[in-house]
Image (cartoon, helix red, strand yellow):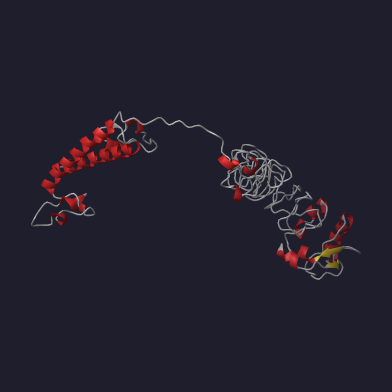
Amino acid sequence: MQYFRNTPRRTMDCQNPHRPDMLPLCRGDSELRAGIAGNRQNGSGCPGNARYNEPEYTDQRKTCPLNRESRVNDNSVYGICGCADKDHMHDRDHGCTDKDHMHDRDHGCTDKDHMHDRDRGCADKDHMHDRDCGCVDKNRMHDRDRGCADKDHMHDRNCGCADKDHMHERDCGCVDKNRMHDRDRGCTDKDHMHDRDCGCVDKNRMHDRGCRGEHSCENSPTSEQYGCTGLAMAFVPKQEFTELNDAEDALCRGTLFRKLDMPFYGSGRRNCK
Amino acid sequence: MNERDRLLRRIQAEDFALYETVLYLDGHPQNKKALAFYNKHRDIVKALREEFEGKYGPLNIYGNTGDCDWHWVDKPWPWEKEAN
């Protein structure tokens, strides 16, 4: 992105490109189609008043505001998946039709011919399992970097959330209360659920997260005294000096008190005798 | 397990039971049962230690009984094979 910020956006006449080796980026569906045809025929570019931005087509991953048909037909020219938004078409890994988020990384597209490309999100069942794809496939939605809307998997790492506006964002969070305090889990706060590592209900961890949602500790009326944990009453019976092992058994079992003899059975029992 | 090892094992067991009782007494200093157990096993440990040191040498630096020799260095050190 820095490259584009620092690079002057020069508009040029498609008939006189700065980079003749690169195809110009033209606007207008019908004109673009004609432009592509023209490119193929004479290698010059778009007709008449069509213009292009140099930084955009210097990156092979960037695409143009061609309509779908044009992109599909001219895939070899325009590289990987693109978008239809002229303001964000130069963004990295772009390719979406959502104007609000199409500039987000790993965002996807709805072009089924390109939705299987890397870092593209898709709604196509056949390709939704591709890397970094955002999907709605229950079997895949728990994969890393998948966005999902499935409650059972939304707590997975980098899994998305159920907020359709943000569910395609990387590291987007979930609405699972049990998991929302985990790292890389999100929150239910719409304003912050798309923040990386957002959301927690753990007072000790909330400063690491960017959430101020309804589940945040700040909204807990007892947070000053008790943090975010609920109240509980514990009862621990008084230990009596009874039911003692003899000295040899105590050494073997690790305790003098039989009531405290709670061995770990995970790796078998030690033979004391 | 020879006689020395059996005696040493018994000292270890009695020592462990004694320390368990000490920990209990830290939280229940007026428990008569625990105090009686402690007193009984303290005496047992003391007798066992004296017996062991009389036969096999000192168990620690406080167990040297000779007037003419420093027996502490006669026995294998813990990291030596003979001591294990």
* Residue B30 placement: quadrant: top left
Q: Give percent across and percent down for residue A217.
A: 62, 43
Q: Give percent across and percent down for residue B40.
A: 21, 35
Residue under the image location 84 percent in, 60 percent down: A36
Quadrant in which the C terminus of chain A is drawn: top left
Above or below residue B7? Residue A81 is: below
Q: Is residue A231 visible?
A: yes
Position of A82 compared to B73: left or right?
right
* Residue A22 placement: quadrant: bottom right
* Residue A128 placement: quadrant: top right
Q: Nearer the viewer, residue A72 or A180?
A: A180
Q: How many marks?
A: 0
Quadrant in which the N terminus of chain A is drawn: bottom right
Q: Which residue reaches farthest right?
A: A48
Position of B17 compared to A134: left or right?
left
Q: Give percent across and percent down for residue A38.
A: 86, 62
Q: Nearer the viewer, residue A68 or A261?
A: A261
Q: Is residue A273 visible?
A: no
Q: Which residue reaches farthest top?
A: A243
Q: Nearer the viewer, residue A159 or A190?
A: A190
Residue under the image location 23 percent in, 42 percent down: B12
Q: Give percent across and percent down for residue A72.
A: 78, 52
Q: Which residue reaches farthest front?
A: B30
